[in-house]
Image (spheres, rainbow, N blue to C red):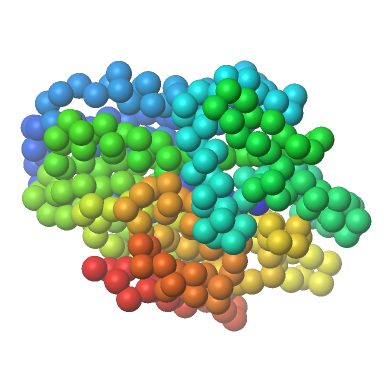
């Protein structure tokens, strides 16, 4: 299970506001989508509303598990889906690639485990090893389903998948492609705290994004910035756990994140992961994967991939934190 910290919920990323007068060529578009919000700033006089709405609809129909008529919901319920959309097929192919690249730490097939754990974190004794191991048998994403042009089929009964950990990033990539092909040089696209930026902001400077400092008190609404990073032609995604946790019978704090390898909650102290990548889908999925990996594995994963950069926030004694970043994260 993952928890992506998103602005409007508990945002870990936000734009550092411009104080000067806005350029009249920049459109400022805001609204709701996928159970969260979107915010776009686009340096163009052309109206892209129809294209934006079309992408939203395509992703929603393909992969929203909260929509009973979506393709993924029907697949999860019946075990088969005929004549899938190009969007659903593309998302599944990309998801299998990210599953392989992260050694299974990004794993849409742990959905049955997530569903089981969802209401059981505080009552952990109700889930035993036998039950977890049975569910783990459904989570080999590379082998539990076949993906063909005309049909998607689960090979095991009760298997189910959830693509929400890549939905926002995938959507941002699709929107960025539309703007790039139209020749738009400057824009900022944000969905639920996930970012994709090109060129310059309205002040003629590189987009400046704030990374939120962890706040362990859910009643405190004030937000503070632990660091800032400039985005020119890249995406940025943050996944975090510091707002979702529980205490066991010994008073030990645990994050609401399930390790896809063991099927049980993670034991590490990683609070937040921010990933920079050219592709927002990669940033989105890899940030999710790193939250499951933990601190040390995440560092090695980030350092071994020249296409990404990362920033970690780790808890130490008394809820204080320390940070780590890869060599070129702030470049």
Left or right, 208 with respect to 63, comes to: left
Q: Is residue 220 shown to the viewer in this render? A: no
Question: Can you say which quadrant of the picture contains the C terminus?
Answer: bottom left
Which residue is at the front of the view, 171 or 13? 171
Q: Report x, y in % for residue 269.
A: 60, 72
Q: Report x, y in % for residue 267.
A: 69, 70
Q: Report x, y in % for residue 318.
A: 59, 78
Residue 266's place in the image compared with 111, above or below, is below
Residue 57's place in the image compared with 37, above or below, is above
Q: Report x, y in % for residue 105.
A: 60, 59
- Residue drawn at point x = 79 percent, y = 65 percent: 248
Residue 205's place in the image compared with 304, above or below, is above
Q: Is residue 95 shown to the viewer in this render? A: yes
- Residue drawn at point x = 59 percent, y = 61 percent: 103
What is the total number of numbered labels drawn onto the structure image?
0
- Residue drawn at point x = 75 percent, y = 37 percent: 155
- Residue drawn at point x = 47 percent, y = 77 percent: 322
* Quarter of the figure with residue 72: top right
Residue 323's place in the image compared with 33, above or below, is below
Which residue is at the front of the view, 80 or 58? 80
**Residue lying farthest to the bottom in this orientation:** 317
* Quarter of the figure with residue 125: bottom right
Left or right, 101 with respect to 227, comes to: right
């Amino acid at each position: 299970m993952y928890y992506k910290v998103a602005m409007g919920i508990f945002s870990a990323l936000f734009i550092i506001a411009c104080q000067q007068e806005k350029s009249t060529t920049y459109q400022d578009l805001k609204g709701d989508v996928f159970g969260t919000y979107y915010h776009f700033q686009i340096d163009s006089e052309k109206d892209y509303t129809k294209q934006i709405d079309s992408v939203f609809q395509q992703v929603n129909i393909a992969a929203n598990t909260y929509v009973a008529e979506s393709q993924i919901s029907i697949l999860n319920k019946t075990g088969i889906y005929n004549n899938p959309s190009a969007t659903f097929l593309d998302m599944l192919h990309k998801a299998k690639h990210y599953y392989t690249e992260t050694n299974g730490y990004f794993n849409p097939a742990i959905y049955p485990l997530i569903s089981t754990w969802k209401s059981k974190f505080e009552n952990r004794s109700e889930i035993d090893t036998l039950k977890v191991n049975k569910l783990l048998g459904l989570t080999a994403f590379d082998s539990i389903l076949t993906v063909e042009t005309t049909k998607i089929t689960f090979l095991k009964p009760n298997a189910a998948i959830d693509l929400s950990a890549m939905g926002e990033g995938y959507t941002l990539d699709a929107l960025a492609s539309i703007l790039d092909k139209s020749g738009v040089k400057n824009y900022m696209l944000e969905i639920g705290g996930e970012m994709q930026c090109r060129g310059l902001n309205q002040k003629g400077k590189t987009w400046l994004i704030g990374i939120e400092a962890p706040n362990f008190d859910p009643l405190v609404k004030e937000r503070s910035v632990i660091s800032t990073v400039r985005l020119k032609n890249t995406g940025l995604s943050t996944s975090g756990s510091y707002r979702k946790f529980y205490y066991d019978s010994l008073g030990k704090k645990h994050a609401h994140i399930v390790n896809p390898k063991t099927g049980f909650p993670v034991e590490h102290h990683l609070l937040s992961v921010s990933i920079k990548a050219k592709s927002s889908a990669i940033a989105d999925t890899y940030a999710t994967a790193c939250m499951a990996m933990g601190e040390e594995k995440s560092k090695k994963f980030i350092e071994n991939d020249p296409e990404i950069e990362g920033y970690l926030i780790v808890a130490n004694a008394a809820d204080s934190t320390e940070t780590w970043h890869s060599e070129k994260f702030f470049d």
